[in-house]
């Protein structure tokens, strides 16, 4: 993520973002099993999606901080995504109103809560943080998903997974706390 901020915004993030990003990356690596030998084409597609998601976070954060209009940005992104998805669906899938009607509750839930509300809140919150910090915070989805699955659903996680969760949590704390200390430091008189 810091590389994307440097590439697109032409500005270097706070120095603590680099070790924070490396800690988050190491945490995700450990949480996913700690080995690269079992990577599949689906995993590689996930990496490609993560790069585009990082670009989206970077550009959304910049746009929202400059324009101050997070709802306009979210509405525009929803409209563009809807048009593109409908065009692709019309080209490659049979569209049936009965299938849409039968999946209606699930479509509404995902559209309203998982995508709509969560994305709008994310874009609004990005006004109050840097894109690099936002990316590290958003990578915590894996941390909380795995931790809650172990705690609530009694799923098992190896020791490396817990170490990965700890690294990701520390990365989140570091990228939030260290820049705050630097801002609060009083200049010497």
Image (spheres, rainbow, N blue to C red):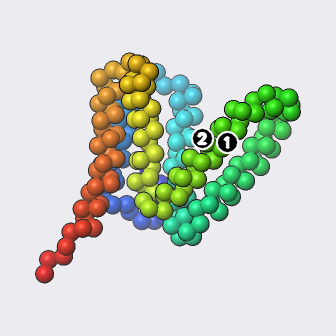
| Circle 1 Cα neighbour tier, 10 Å, few/some/many (<14 / 14–19 / ≥20) | some
Measuring from the top left, give residue 87's x and y in whole percent: 80, 44
Q: In this view, does 107 lie to the left or right of 117?
A: right
- The answer for how far apart the CA atoms under marks 2 and 1 are is 6 Å
Does 140 appear above or below 121? above
Residue 132 seen from this side:
yes
Please tell me whether mark 1 sits on a helix, a strand or a loop.
helix
Q: Residue 162 carries which label?
A: none
For residue 127, above or below residue 140: below
Q: Can residue 52 be seen in this view?
A: no
Q: Nearer the viewer, residue 167 or 49?
A: 167
Q: Is residue 99 above or below residue 74?
A: above
- Residue positioned most to the bottom: 189
Left or right: 66 as drawn, with respect to 165: right
Q: Do the residues labelled 2 and 1 touch (CB within 8 Å)?
A: yes
Check disc 2 and report the residue beneath it: 114
Q: What number is the disc on residue 111?
A: 1
Describe the element under mark 2 as helix, strand or loop.
helix
Residue at 33% x, 54% y: name it. 176
The picture places residue 47, in percent across and down from the top left corner, at 52, 37
The front one of 37 and 69 is: 69
């Amino acid at each position: 993520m810091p590389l994307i901020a440097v590439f697109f915004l032409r500005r270097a993030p706070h120095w603590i973002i680099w070790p924070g990003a490396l800690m988050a990356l190491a945490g995700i690596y450990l949480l996913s099993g700690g080995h690269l030998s079992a990577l599949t084409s689906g995993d590689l597609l996930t990496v490609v999606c993560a790069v585009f998601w990082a670009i989206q976070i970077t550009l959304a954060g910049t746009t929202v901080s400059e324009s101050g209009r997070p709802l306009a940005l979210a509405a525009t992104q929803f409209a563009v995504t809807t048009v593109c998805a409908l065009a692709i669906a019309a080209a490659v899938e049979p569209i049936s109103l009965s299938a849409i009607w039968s999946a209606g509750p699930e479509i509404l839930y995902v559209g309203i809560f998982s995508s709509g509300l969560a994305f709008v809140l994310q874009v609004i919150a990005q006004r109050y943080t840097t894109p690099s910090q936002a990316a590290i915070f958003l990578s915590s989805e894996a941390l909380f998903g795995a931790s809650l699955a172990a705690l609530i659903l009694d799923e098992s996680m190896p020791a490396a997974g817990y170490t990965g969760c700890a690294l990701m949590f520390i990365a989140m704390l570091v990228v939030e706390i260290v820049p705050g200390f630097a801002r609060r430091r009083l200049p010497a008189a």
